């Protein structure tokens, strides 16, 4: 399993970011190999981002070269260069719980306020 962390500054308001996330979520739900995506916002800096949990490195690479990934900078009005980090999962604390469903009900609702 691979975890990818992406953080960026955006030209969108919090409300616009929440709308963009909701509009684009179905495209991410359909991605092969994506177990989960967490939409994040750092309160101190206002930066947005995503934490992606991938089945494997090939799935992540396929996404990174996809049309969907290419639209991220424009969709989120990314300012400057995003920070991207990639991690290999070496252990899972509670494997019986699995990785939460990508159809989570909270799509950043309270975090975007």
Image (cartoon, helix red, strand yellow):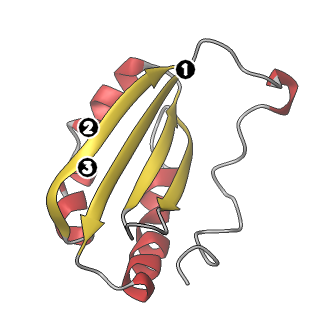
Q: Position of residue 66 (x, y in %)?
A: 23, 42
Residue at image location 16% in from the left, 66% down from the top: 79
Circle 2 is placed at which residue position? Answer: 64
Q: Is residue 8 above or below residue 11?
A: above
Q: Position of residue 29 (x, y in %)?
A: 52, 52
Circle 1 is placed at which residue position? Answer: 1
Structural crowding at the residue carrying mark 3, measured as other residues with C-alpha within 10 Å and reported as few (<14), some (14–19) or many (≥20): few
Between 67 and 87, the one lying in front of the other is 87
Q: How many circles with numbers are drawn on the protein? A: 3
Q: Position of residue 16 (x, y in %)?
A: 37, 85
Q: Quadrant of residue 46?
A: bottom left
Label drawn at residue 35 = none
Q: Quadrant of residue 108?
A: bottom right
Q: Position of residue 101 (x, y in %)?
A: 70, 47
Q: Are marks 2 and 3 in contact (CB under 8 Å)?
A: yes
- Residue lying at the far front of the rendered structure: 44
- Residue lying at the far right of the rendered structure: 96
- Residue lying at the far left of the rendered structure: 80
Label drawn at residue 69 = 3
Between 51 and 19, the one lying in front of the other is 51
Q: Is residue 39 left or right of residue 82?
A: right
Structural crowding at the residue carrying mark 1, measured as other residues with C-alpha within 10 Å and reported as few (<14), some (14–19) or many (≥20): some
Q: CA distance from mark 2 to mark 3?
A: 6 Å
* Mark closer to the chain start, 2 or 3: 2
* Mark closer to the chain start, 2 or 1: 1
Q: CA distance from mark 2 to mark 1?
A: 16 Å
* Mark closer to the chain start, 3 or 1: 1
Residue at image location 47% in from the left, 62% down from the top: 42
Q: Quadrant of the N terminus?
A: top right
Q: Is residue 42 above or below residue 12?
A: above
């Amino acid at each position: 399993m691979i975890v990818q962390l992406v953080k960026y500054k955006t030209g969108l308001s919090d409300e616009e970011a929440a709308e963009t996330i909701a509009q684009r979520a179905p495209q991410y739900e359909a991605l092969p190999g994506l177990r989960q995506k967490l939409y994040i916002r750092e309160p101190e800096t206002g930066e947005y981002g995503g934490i992606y949990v991938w089945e494997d490195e090939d799935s992540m690479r396929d996404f990174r070269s996809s049309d969907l990934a290419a639209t991220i900078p424009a969709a989120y009005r990314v300012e400057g260069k995003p920070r991207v980090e990639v991690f290999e999962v070496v252990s899972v604390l509670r494997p019986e719980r699995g990785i939460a469903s990508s159809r989570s009900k909270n799509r950043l609702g309270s975090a975007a306020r």
